[in-house]
């Protein structure tokens, strides 16, 4: 197996699009060598714990609805191209994602990281749910057969907050300034949402190298 690290934030639309493009390639190459692990990166590390009204956030970041519409136009187009019908108008709040990242981390311990990461994308981008809300996170945990009561108890504590911040800071020190960023085999960084054809080429190259090594 080859490690594929995904550095991502569950409120990042390009992360959702990029993972969907990767999934399309993995479906084309079911013999792919990847073992996937998700890692935290907060797009808005200074976001208040309670999050922010979506309209206020867009006003501050893009100068209003027109600026936001221009910024999100390529996102909507790219999402539709891979079959994602994002409900951006349904998003009421831009959350602080520290607790969502903690849930992804805990899910990893139970081997359910992928299911939780994708459920967070769906909750935010399709259902308009506040993924900083502890009840929402508990529902997501329950939906993948994690113990929601244990998750709720952990969320009320400071468990793993420092660790998430350290990981995030470590990626920034490595020079990562945006997500998604994919790291193949611990050394090859692939930034941004990449088309399925690129991932198919990467998979074929890795599988070819493995076959050559086996023949040798």
Image: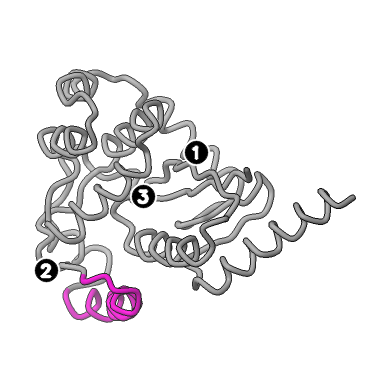
Query: Residue visible at 12% across and 57% down?
Result: 127
Q: Secondary structure at mark 1?
A: helix
Above/below status of 193 relative to 108: below
Residue 100 position in % (x across, y down) = 27, 39
Above/below status of 207 relative to 159: below
Whichever of callouts 1 and 3 sits on the residue coming sooner in the sequence is 3
Above/below status of 155 relative to 34: above
- Would residue 69 appear left or right of 161 to someone viewing this image? left
Residue 182 position in % (x across, y down) = 54, 54
**In the rendered structure, which segment of residues is drawn in magenta?**
65-85
Which residue is tagged 3?
9
The numbered disc on residue 34 is none
How many C-alpha atoms fall within 10 Å of the one at disc 3: few (<14), some, or many (≥20)?
Answer: many
Instruction: Kindly report which numbered mark, 1 or 2, lies closer to the viewer in this rendering.
Output: 2
How many C-alpha atoms fall within 10 Å of the one at disc 2: few (<14), some, or many (≥20)?
Answer: few
What is the spatial separation of the Cα atoms under label 1 and label 2, in whole angstroms? 31 Å
Query: Residue visible at 34% across and 28% down?
Result: 106
Task: Determine whether label 1 and label 3 are within 8 Å by CB.
Answer: no
Above/below status of 138 relative to 159: below
Residue 171 position in % (x across, y down) = 54, 43
Which residue is tagged 2?
89
The tally of labels here is 3
Which residue is tagged 1?
169
> What main secondary structure does the magenta stretch of the protein show?
helix
């Amino acid at each position: 197996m080859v490690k594929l690290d995904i550095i991502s934030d569950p409120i990042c639309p390009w992360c959702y699009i990029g993972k969907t493009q990767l999934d399309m390639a993995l479906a084309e190459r079911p013999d792919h060598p990847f073992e996937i692990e998700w890692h935290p990166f907060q797009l808005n590390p200074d976001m208040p714990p309670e999050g922010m009204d979506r309209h206020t956030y867009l006003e501050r970041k893009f100068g209003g609805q027109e600026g936001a519409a221009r910024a999100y136009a390529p996102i909507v187009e790219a999402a539709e191209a891979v079959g994602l019908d994002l409900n951006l108008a349904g998003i009421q709040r831009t959350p602080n994602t520290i607790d969502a990242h903690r849930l992804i981390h805990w899910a990893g311990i139970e081997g359910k990281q992928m299911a939780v990461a994708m459920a967070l994308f769906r909750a935010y981008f399709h259902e308009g749910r506040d993924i900083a809300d502890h009840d929402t996170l508990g529902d997501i945990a329950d939906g993948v057969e994690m113990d929601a009561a244990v998750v709720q108890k952990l969320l009320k504590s400071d468990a793993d907050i420092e660790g998430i911040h350290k990981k995030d800071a470590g990626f920034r020190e490595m020079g990562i300034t945006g997500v998604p960023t994919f790291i193949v085999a611990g050394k090859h960084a692939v930034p941004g949402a990449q088309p399925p054809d690129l991932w198919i080429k990467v998979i074929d190259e890795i599988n070819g190298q493995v076959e050559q090594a086996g023949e040798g």
